[in-house]
Image: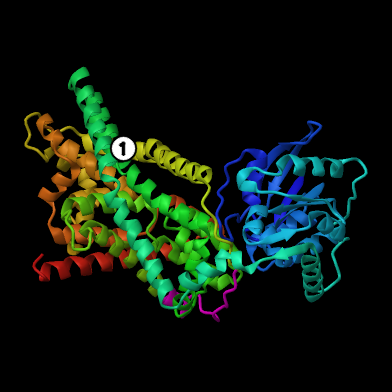
């Protein structure tokens, strides 16, 4: 086994993907990898070797759960954990003096080591020329220049690794080679080596510093961040309309084809009213989700993500969190599950627990279909000036409400159940990079696959179960529209739940959608579509979109209350399971469910009655 080790954001995961052909998530910010990942590579002589990608750390003295994973693997301290046969230490060539400190600590262990001097192209861009042979001689180990994102230097790296895995390689017992020099000694030694092997340094080409003077400015920086986020939400609606209409048209054509090819039976209703109507209502929002992810991936890959965390540090410190919590929270916009797992980079237990508890308030991509269908149904698609669309503005307000709700919840939690001193925030700023088109394409493909897989499994299964509960017992032939839903098993359950949610403006159909939405947020849309399909048996009415149907059944206050509910309501069952795993029990998941349901109920009720009193 060969361990891939280095500081955060040195490019380990990119190198791991390049060597193994894997598709692990990469990003130009610290904390992307929070657990070990294994793959296989072939040496020059054909021998297969297991390669383990480990979380980034600055030393073998861990301060957070993810750093402990790296320490345990490198030193083999856990029972049954074998020492690595060799270590590939990944260094950022453009930040050599800082990264060499950890490399010196690893070299002192006595294990076979090869250095991957990564991001060699960025060092050259910044005017740095490194004497690689001199660096190798100073460290006493092979040093190979690499550019992982462009697959440069991989053959040379494998060739340098092969001799280190022979029979005569050094093997140590756990802890035997632990270095005794101090952190300050290693830092001084690292700085001397970096200065001796850097033969040219031209600060005029350091674009990162020049850009940071603008994007990290105390006034211009927050304005740029807000503008980027606002543009992202405008693009979600402005750029997705045409492909979304095409998908919607395809689903309607598929329904018509099935209706024309099959007799009017219960099986046809399952396919048309259950599978196609329910799943199709969710799939139609794939373009909007991909646009949102494209923006997030570009922010991650470019190096701007950490700058956003830095800008948010002052605001987050006022609610008892540090800027380090911002990255897991921002990751939760894609999905709360990886966001919660990313909290392993937070060393303070109270800070980490608070971040886990508020991560579900970040508006994940699963909520986007819910927002999109309600906004399209009740918010006019008109401009409010300067090319700003009202629909995009409302979507931005919903995301902003989730952020403000999370900050308020953090403030209350840090002063009560997770009370503790505020921690400082220190994080290395990565160099700016042009996002690699291949990484962006793979990232979008993986998101699209995950979304469609979710639609074809969890959402499809839940929709079929809901269809069955809505279809039985069958209403008498000739009954007026709406009778089938009212007499069905699901309708009877929803009628009981409707008494609970009626004070906040919800009706029976919303009550029906809330229960299956616990499996996945998007199921709320498929549930509404399935109810609408069964509620309108007239085939001539199938051309009516879900948005048009809701517009005729709901009032604007009810629609706004529904949006408010989904801003604060608990996440899916998978998120609850991850919270249970990360907190080692059901205490905190139970607490999270209670406070989020209470918050959602209060927010929906307040929104509904304010809208009613305002005469909307």
Residue displayed at 23% across by 23% down: 258
Residue displayed at 60% across by 47% down: 149
| Majority SS type along the magenta span | loop
Along the viewing direction, whichever of 311 and 66 lies nearer the viewer: 311
* Residue 420 located left or right of residue 409: right
* Residue 159 located left or right of residue 481: right
Along the viewing direction, whichever of 135 and 590 lies nearer the viewer: 135
Q: Position of residue 508 (x, y in %)?
A: 18, 51
Q: Which residues are magenta?
A: 410-427
Q: Position of residue 63 (x, y in %)?
A: 67, 68
Residue displayed at 21% across by 31% down: 252
Where is 45 relative to 120, above or below?
above
Q: Position of residue 424 (x, y in %)?
A: 57, 78
Along the viewing direction, whichever of 75 and 605 lies nearer the viewer: 75
Residue 416 is inside the magenta segment:
yes
Q: Position of residue 546 (x, y in %)?
A: 19, 43
Q: Residues within 10 Å of mark 1 (few under 14, many from 20)?
A: many
Q: Which residue is mark 1?
A: 279
């Amino acid at each position: 086994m060969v361990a891939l080790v280095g500081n955060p954001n040195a490019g380990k995961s990119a190198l791991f993907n390049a060597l193994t052909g894997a598709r692990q998530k990469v990003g130009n910010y610290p904390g992307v990898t929070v657990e070990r990942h294994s793959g296989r590579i072939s040496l020059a002589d054909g021998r297969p070797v297991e390669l383990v990608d480990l979380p980034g750390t600055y030393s073998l003295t861990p301060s957070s759960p993810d750093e402990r994973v790296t320490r345990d693997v490198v030193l083999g301290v856990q029972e049954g954990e074998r020492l690595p046969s060799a270590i590939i230490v990944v260094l950022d060539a453009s930040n050599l003096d800082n990264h060499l400190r950890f490399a010196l600590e690893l070299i002192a262990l006595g294990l076979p080591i090869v250095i991957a001097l990564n991001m060699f192209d960025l060092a050259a861009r910044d005017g740095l020329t490194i004497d690689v042979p001199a660096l190798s001689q100073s460290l006493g180990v092979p040093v190979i220049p690499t550019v992982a994102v462009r697959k440069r230097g991989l053959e040379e790296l494998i060739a340098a690794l092969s001799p280190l895995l022979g029979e005569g390689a050094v093997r140590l017992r756990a802890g035997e080679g632990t270095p005794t020099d101090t952190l300050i000694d290693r830092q001084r030694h690292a700085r001397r080596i970096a200065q001796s092997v850097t033969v040219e340094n031209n600060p005029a080409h350091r674009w990162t510093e020049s850009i940071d003077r603008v994007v990290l400015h105390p006034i211009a920086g927050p304005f740029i961040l807000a503008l980027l986020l606002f543009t992202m939400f405008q693009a979600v609606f402005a750029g997705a309309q045409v492909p979304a209409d095409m998908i919607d048209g395809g689903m309607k054509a598929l329904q018509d084809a099935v209706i024309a090819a099959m007799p009017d039976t219960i099986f046809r209703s399952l396919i048309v009213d259950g599978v196609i109507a329910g799943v199709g209502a969710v799939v139609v929002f794939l373009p909007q989700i991909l646009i949102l992810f494209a923006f997030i991936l570009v922010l991650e890959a470019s190096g701007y993500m950490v700058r956003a965390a830095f800008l948010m540090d002052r605001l987050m410190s006022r609610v008892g969190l540090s800027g380090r919590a911002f990255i897991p929270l921002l990751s939760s916009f894609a999905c709360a599950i990886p966001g919660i797992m990313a909290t392993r980079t937070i060393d303070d237990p109270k800070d980490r627990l608070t971040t886990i508890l508020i991560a579900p308030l970040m508006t994940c991509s699963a909520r986007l279909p819910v927002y999109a269908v309600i906004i399209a149904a009740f918010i006019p698609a008109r401009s409010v000036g300067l090319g700003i669309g009202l629909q995009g503005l409302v979507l931005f307000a919903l995301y902003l409400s989730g952020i403000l709700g999370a900050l308020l919840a953090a403030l209350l939690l840090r002063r009560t159940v997770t009370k503790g001193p505020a921690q400082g925030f220190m994080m290395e700023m990565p160099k700016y990079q042009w996002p690699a088109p291949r990484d962006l394409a793979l990232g979008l493909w993986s998101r699209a696959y995950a979304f469609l897989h979710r639609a074809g499994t969890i959402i499809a299964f839940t929709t079929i179960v809901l269809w069955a509960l809505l279809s039985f017992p069958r209403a008498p032939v000739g009954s007026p529209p709406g009778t089938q839903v009212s007499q069905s098993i699901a309708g009877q359950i929803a009628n009981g739940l409707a008494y609970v949610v009626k004070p906040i403006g919800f009706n029976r159909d919303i009550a029906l959608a809330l229960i299956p939405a616990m499996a996945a947020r998007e199921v709320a849309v498929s549930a509404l579509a399935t109810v609408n399909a069964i509620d309108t048996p007239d085939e001539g009415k199938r051309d009516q979109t879900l948005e048009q149907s809701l517009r005729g059944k709901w009032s604007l206050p009810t629609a706004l209350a529904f949006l408010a509910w989904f801003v604060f309501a608990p996440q899916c069952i998978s998120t609850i399971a991850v919270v249970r795993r990360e907190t080692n029990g059901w205490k905190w998941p139970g607490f999270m469910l209670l406070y989020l349901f209470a918050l959602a109920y209060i927010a929906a009720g307040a929104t509904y009655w304010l809208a009613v009193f305002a005469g909307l």
